[in-house]
Image: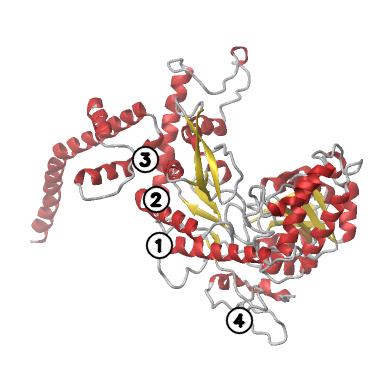
C-alpha cells in the first residue's frame, strides 16, 4: 500500500504551474493537488504524505469492503422486519 | 463641519450603512458622513455618502476544510512531538536543558506547539530579506532550506525587480535617492546622524521644532510633538494621559501598541466590538451610570481608543458617530492614524478630512511617519496645552532618544511635497493616484470573485485565503512570478481567517497592477480561492447585525 502511494506521488507532480485540461492526466494531477492543499498535505514532508495517504486509503478500502459485504444483508433483514410488521397489520385488520 | 445630531446614534442606523447609493462627490466638496436618511442640506456644503464596508462570510465547506486542515496538522504535530521526545528523531526546536526536565514546562503551551509544528513548515514565506529600497519594485535575496525550514542558506542570487505589494509605501516616497532628497543630504552633512540625548536633556533640535510646526499646520491643529518610534509613541504616551481610576474603551481589533499602552497605564480597560456604535454607547452608558466597579464613584476620565484604518481588516473607523457619542457622554477620543495619514482624504490629511470633520473634535490625534512619509517615528497632535503636558510628562520624552535629524528632514520634505509647499502639485497628484489605484484594484478583485474585507476607499486590501496550505502555496507561487506579498496567519488574525494583505501604492503603475491582477486571477483558479458569492451583483449585501444591543 505504501509503495502504491509512493508511486502515485512520483507520478503526479507536486507543483502545478499549468492548468491545461486537455489531458486527463493533467486534470487528475490538478485534482490531487487540490486534495493536498485542502487537507494540509502540501506542507507535510514526503514520508508524512505517504503515511497520511496510506492511512486514508486503508480506511477508505475498509469502508468500501464493509459496504459491499454488509449492506445487502442489512437491507434484506430490514425489509423482512418491516414486511412482517405490515403483515401483522394486514392480518389484524382483515 | 459635519453635524450629526445627538439622536442619530440612538435610532440604530447601522442598517443603512451598507446601502449602495450614488456617489455624491463634487470637486469642491468631498465630505462624507453617516445619516440615516438621505440629507441634502442646502445651507451646509456637505453631501453625505454612507460607508460601504463588507465582511463577507465564507461558504460553510471552506470553514469545514480549514478546520480539517488544522486538525491534520495538529495530529501530525503530536506525532512528530512524540518522535522527537522519544529520541527517534533529532530535535531542532528549543527544549529545556536536561537538568530542568522536572521544572514547570516551558514549551508545552499551544503557542509553542503551533510554532514548532505548523509555523515551521511554512516559515519560508516570512522574514524574507530584501536588498534594495522598498519602492514599487525591489530586489529579494534568494534563499533555500535543506531541512524543511529549520535553517536557511542564501544561494547568493538576487531576484530582481519583484513587484512590491507588501510594503507600506502608500505615496511611493520610500525610494532610492533622487534629486528631491537633496535637503536630506545637506542635513546629514550638517547635523550628523545621531542625537545622543533625549528630548528633555539636549536632544531637541531646531529641526524638531520645524517639524512639529509643520505637522501642526498639516493637520490643522494647534500643536504637535514628534517621537522617534511609532510603537513607542502609543505605548509611552497613553500611560501619561490616563492612569488608575480612568476608563479606557478600546476597539476589539486595536493594534498591539495601543493595547500595550492601555495595559501599562493601569486604567480599567473595556473592549467594544469592532466599529460597533451600539456596543460602544452601551458601554459608555453603563460606565456613567454605574461608575467605578466597587466604589461607585464617577470615572476620572473616559478615553475611547480607535484607529483610523485597521490594518488587518481594511475598515475605516466610523468617525462621525464616535464624535457624536463622545460629545454626548463627555468622553475623550484618541485616534491612531498610522495607516490613514497621507493615504485617505482628498488631500491626504487622514480620516478626519475623509469625513469632512473638524480636527478639533478629536482630542488626541496620533500617527506615524513610517507608512506614507518614507521615514520613521510618530507624532501626537492636538491642543497646545495637551502637547505641552506631554512634553513634560511623556516617558518617551524623558527616556527615549529623540528623532535623528536626517529622518526628521525626510519627513519635512515629504510633508512639504504632499502639501504642495515645494511649489509643485505632484504631492496632490500622488494622493489622487493612490485613490485611483485603490479603487481600481478593489473593484477588479471584487469582480473576480475573491472575498475582500474592508472599506472600498482603504488602500489596505485583505484577501481571505482561509486554509493554511493555500497560504503557503499562494505566497510561494507568487514569488515565483516575481510578485512579493505579505500573508498573515494565526496569531495576528483569527485561526480560521488567514489572509493576504495588499498595500496599494501611488508608485504602482497600471501595468504593474494589471500584472498582479492577472497573476491573482490565475492563482485564484489554480488554488480555488474565489469564494465570493456575490460576484457580479450590482448591489452589495446588506450588513446584517445580529449582535444588536438595544438601548432602553
Mark 1 falls within which chain? B
- Which residue is located at x 80 percent, y 48 percent? B237
Q: Earlier in the sequence, mark 4 or mark 1?
A: 4
C-alpha distance separating marks 1 and 3:
23 Å
Nearest the eye: B544 or B436:
B436
Mark 4 falls within which chain? B
C-alpha distance separating marks 4 and 3:
49 Å
- The quadrant the N terminus of chain B occupies is bottom right
Q: Residues within 10 Å of mark 3 (few under 14, many from 20)?
A: many
- Which residue is located at x 56 percent, y 27 percent? B108
Instruction: Say which mark, if any, is on residue A39.
Output: 3
Nearer the observer, disc 2 or disc 3?
Answer: 2
* Residue B335 visible in the displayed image: no
> In this figure, which residue is indicated by the disc labeled 1?
B533
x and y, in percent, of residue B186 in the image: 79, 47
Pointers 1 and 3 within a single chain? no
Mark 3 falls within which chain? A
* Residue A28 visible in the displayed image: yes
Q: Earlier in the sequence, mark 4 or mark 2?
A: 4
x and y, in percent, of residue A37 in the image: 37, 42
Mark 2 falls within which chain? B
> In this figure, which residue is indicated by the disc labeled 4?
B38
Q: Earlier in the sequence, mark 1 or mark 2?
A: 2
**Quick check: B293 left or right of A50?**
right
Q: Is residue B82 above or below residue B175?
A: above
Amino acid at each position: 500500500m505504501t509503495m502504491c502511494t509512493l508511486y502515485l506521488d512520483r507520478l503526479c507532480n507536486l507543483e502545478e504551474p499549468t492548468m491545461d485540461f486537455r489531458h486527463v492526466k493533467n486534470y487528475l494531477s490538478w485534482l490531487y493537488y487540490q486534495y493536498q492543499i485542502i487537507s494540509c498535505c502540501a506542507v507535510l514532508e514526503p514520508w508524512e504524505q505517504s503515511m497520511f495517504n496510506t492511512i486514508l486509503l486503508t480506511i477508505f478500502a475498509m469502508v468500501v469492503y464493509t459496504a459491499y459485504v454488509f449492506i445487502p444483508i442489512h437491507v434484506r433483514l430490514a425489509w423482512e422486519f418491516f414486511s412482517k410488521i405490515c403483515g401483522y397489520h394486514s392480518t389484524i385488520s382483515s | 463641519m459635519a453635524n450629526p445630531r445627538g439622536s442619530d446614534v440612538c435610532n440604530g442606523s447601522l442598517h443603512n450603512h451598507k446601502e449602495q447609493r450614488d456617489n455624491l462627490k463634487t470637486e469642491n466638496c468631498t465630505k462624507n458622513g453617516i445619516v440615516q436618511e438621505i440629507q441634502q442640506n442646502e445651507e451646509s456644503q456637505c453631501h453625505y455618502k454612507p460607508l460601504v464596508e463588507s465582511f463577507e462570510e465564507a461558504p460553510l465547506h471552506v470553514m469545514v476544510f480549514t478546520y480539517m486542515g488544522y486538525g491534520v496538522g495538529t495530529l501530525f504535530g503530536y506525532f512528530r512531538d512524540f518522535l522527537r521526545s522519544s529520541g527517534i528523531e533529532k530535535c531542532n526546536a528549543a527544549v529545556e536543558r536536561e537538568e530542568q526536565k522536572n521544572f514547570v514546562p516551558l514549551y508545552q503551551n499551544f503557542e509553542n506547539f503551533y510554532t514548532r509544528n505548523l509555523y515551521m513548515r511554512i516559515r519560508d514565506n516570512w522574514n524574507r530579506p530584501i536588498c534594495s529600497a522598498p519602492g514599487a519594485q525591489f530586489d529579494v535575496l534568494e534563499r533555500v532550506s535543506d531541512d524543511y525550514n529549520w535553517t536557511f542558506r542564501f544561494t547568493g542570487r538576487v531576484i530582481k525587480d519583484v513587484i512590491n505589494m507588501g510594503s507600506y509605501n502608500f505615496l511611493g516616497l520610500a525610494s532610492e535617492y533622487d534629486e528631491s532628497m537633496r535637503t536630506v543630504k545637506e542635513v546629514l552633512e550638517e547635523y550628523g546622524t545621531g542625537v545622543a540625548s533625549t528630548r528633555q536633556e539636549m536632544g531637541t533640535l531646531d529641526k524638531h521644532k520645524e517639524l512639529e510646526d509643520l505637522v501642526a499646520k498639516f493637520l490643522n491643529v494647534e500643536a504637535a510633538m514628534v517621537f522617534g518610534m511609532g510603537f513607542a509613541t502609543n505605548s509611552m504616551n497613553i500611560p501619561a494621559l490616563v492612569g488608575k481610576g480612568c476608563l479606557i474603551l478600546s476597539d476589539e481589533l486595536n493594534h498591539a501598541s495601543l493595547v500595550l499602552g492601555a495595559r501599562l497605564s493601569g486604567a480599567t480597560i473595556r473592549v467594544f466590538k469592532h466599529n460597533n456604535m451600539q456596543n460602544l454607547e452601551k458601554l459608555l452608558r453603563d460606565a456613567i451610570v454605574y461608575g467605578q466597579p466597587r466604589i461607585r464613584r464617577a470615572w476620572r476620565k473616559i478615553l475611547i481608543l480607535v484607529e483610523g484604518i485597521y490594518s488587518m481588516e481594511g475598515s475605516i473607523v466610523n468617525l462621525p458617530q464616535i464624535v457624536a457619542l463622545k460629545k454626548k457622554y463627555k468622553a475623550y477620543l484618541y485616534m491612531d492614524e498610522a495607516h490613514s495619514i497621507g493615504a485617505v482624504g482628498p488631500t491626504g490629511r487622514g480620516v478626519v478630512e475623509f469625513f469632512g470633520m473638524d480636527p478639533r473634535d478629536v482630542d488626541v490625534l496620533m500617527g506615524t511617519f513610517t507608512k506614507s512619509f518614507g521615514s520613521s517615528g510618530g507624532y501626537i497632535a492636538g491642543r497646545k496645552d495637551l502637547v505641552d503636558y506631554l512634553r513634560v510628562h511623556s516617558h518617551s520624552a524623558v527616556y527615549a532618544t529623540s528623532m535623528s535629524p536626517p529622518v526628521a528632514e525626510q519627513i519635512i520634505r515629504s510633508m512639504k511635497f504632499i502639501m504642495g509647499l515645494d511649489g509643485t502639485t505632484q504631492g496632490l497628484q500622488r494622493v489622487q493616484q493612490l485613490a485611483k489605484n485603490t479603487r481600481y484594484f478593489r473593484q477588479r478583485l471584487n469582480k473576480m470573485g475573491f472575498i475582500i474585507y474592508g472599506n472600498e476607499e482603504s488602500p489596505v486590501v485583505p484577501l481571505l485565503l482561509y486554509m493554511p496550505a493555500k497560504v503557503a502555496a499562494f505566497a510561494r507561487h507568487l514569488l515565483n512570478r516575481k510578485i512579493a506579498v505579505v500573508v498573515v496567519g494565526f496569531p495576528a488574525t483569527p485561526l480560521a481567517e488567514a489572509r493576504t494583505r495588499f498595500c496599494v501604492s501611488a508608485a504602482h503603475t497600471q501595468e504593474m497592477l494589471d500584472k498582479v491582477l492577472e497573476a491573482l486571477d490565475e492563482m485564484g483558479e489554480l488554488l480555488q480561492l474565489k469564494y465570493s458569492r456575490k460576484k457580479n451583483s450590482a448591489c452589495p449585501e446588506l450588513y446584517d447585525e445580529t449582535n444588536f444591543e438595544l438601548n432602553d
